[in-house]
């Protein structure tokens, strides 16, 4: 089994939502860090979902990791990090949405095991 550290990013995420990462087939992934930065001149609110609708087995629910979380001007929000980790199965996706168009930069750190 190969272990690979990776970083996924997305810039100017807005109201349409952005799939920052989807776990590939035959792979298990641990999300070890997720930071969202406000790049606007006013406060924004963000949602982060674990979308499991693409799974091939098990529960196929989509759940919020955080919902309507405020991110002040010039600040960032650490959703995953420290002692918080999230395990992703094949087909699972991390989706970030902001309440403001083109307002958030996202950095996701992961460990893929394939």
Image: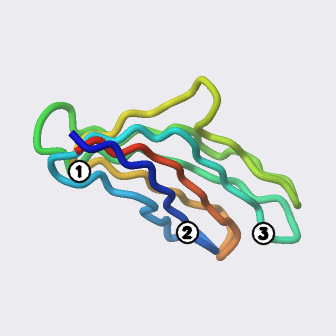
Pointer 3 with pointer 2, Cβ within 8 A: no
Q: CA distance from mark 2 to mark 1?
A: 19 Å
Q: Quadrant of residue 9?
A: bottom right
Residue 16's label in the rendered image is none
Looking at the image, which residue is at 65% across and 62% down? 99
108 sits left or right of 55 in the view: right
In the image, 22 versus 61, the foreground residue is 22
Q: Position of residue 66 (x, y in %)?
A: 58, 39
Residue 10's label in the rendered image is 2
Q: CA distance from mark 1 to mark 3?
A: 30 Å
Looking at the image, which residue is at 61% across and 60% down? 106
- Between discs 3 and 2, the one toward the N terminus: 2
Q: Position of residue 69 (x, y in %)?
A: 69, 44
37 sits left or right of 68 in the view: right
Residue 91's label in the rendered image is 1
Q: Position of residue 4 (x, y in %)?
A: 37, 48
- Between discs 1 and 3, the one toward the N terminus: 3
Q: Position of residue 49 (x, y in %)?
A: 46, 46
Looking at the image, which residue is at 70% across and 70% down? 103
Q: Mark 3, mark 2: which one is toward the viewer?
A: 2
């Amino acid at each position: 089994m190969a272990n690979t550290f990776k970083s996924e990013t997305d810039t100017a995420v807005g109201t349409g939502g952005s799939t920052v990462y989807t776990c590939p087939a035959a792979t298990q992934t641990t999300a070890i860090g997720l930071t969202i930065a406000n790049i606007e001149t006013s406060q924004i609110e963000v949602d982060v979902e674990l979308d499991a609708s693409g799974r091939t087995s098990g529960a196929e629910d989509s759940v919020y990791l955080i919902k309507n979380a405020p991110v002040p001007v010039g600040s960032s929000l650490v959703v995953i990090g420290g002692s918080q980790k999230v395990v992703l199965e094949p087909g699972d996706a991390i989706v970030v949405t902001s309440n403001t168009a083109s307002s958030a930069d996202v950095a996701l750190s992961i460990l893929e095991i394939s």
